[in-house]
Amino acid sequence: MVLATKAGIDGAPECFAGALNVHGVKVPVADLRAWFELNRAADSMFTVVIILDLDGRVLGLMVDSVSDVVRLARRQIRPAPASWTGPDAQYLIGVGIEDDRKLILLDIEKLMGGAVMGQVDAASIG
């Protein structure tokens, strides 16, 4: 993966990692660790960028790894525990139960929508 870094990109939000050229289209890439103010992990062979289409806006989301793609039925989704608080709790949908695994579910449209997309739109990614 060749990621053009955010250096020199005017107005790029802090969670903005750079841009990818995907079939001639420059796609801004957000780093999920930076969004949640977590320590940046070193890129590895497992680091991937998930390409999202959010209401016609294309955005990449850099994550440490993807281990599985799971389809959950409504009955497998539990509400977020009341103990989950803080400013980032608004992005949590709940907990997905799949076999013996518990999966934290995020509302990606809410997370990457609004303010972040406005900043990305305003940034000059060339």
Image (cartoon, rainbow, N blue to C red):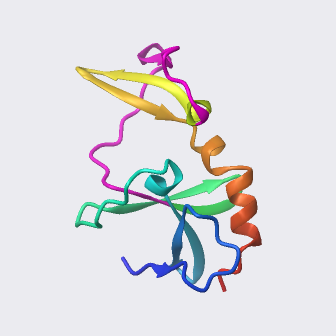
Q: Work out whether residue 22 can be spotted.
A: no
Q: The magenta stretch spans which residues?
A: 61-87
In the picture shown, does residue 79 fall above or below 68? above
Give coordinates of residue 64: x percent, y percent: 33, 55
- Identify whether 108 is placed above or below 117: above
Q: Quadrant of residue 57?
A: bottom right
Is residue 36 shown in magenta? no
Picture coordinates of residue 97, whole percent (x, y): 35, 20
**Residue 111 rendering spot, x and y as whole percentages:** 61, 45
Q: Quadrant of residue 43?
A: bottom left
- The answer to whether residue 85 is magenta is yes
Q: In the displayed structure, does residue 37 sit left or right of residue 14? A: left
Q: Quadrant of the C terminus?
A: bottom right
Q: Is 26 located above or below residue 118 in the figure?
A: below
Name the image quarter holding residue 118.
bottom right
| Residue ID at (59%, 78%) | 26
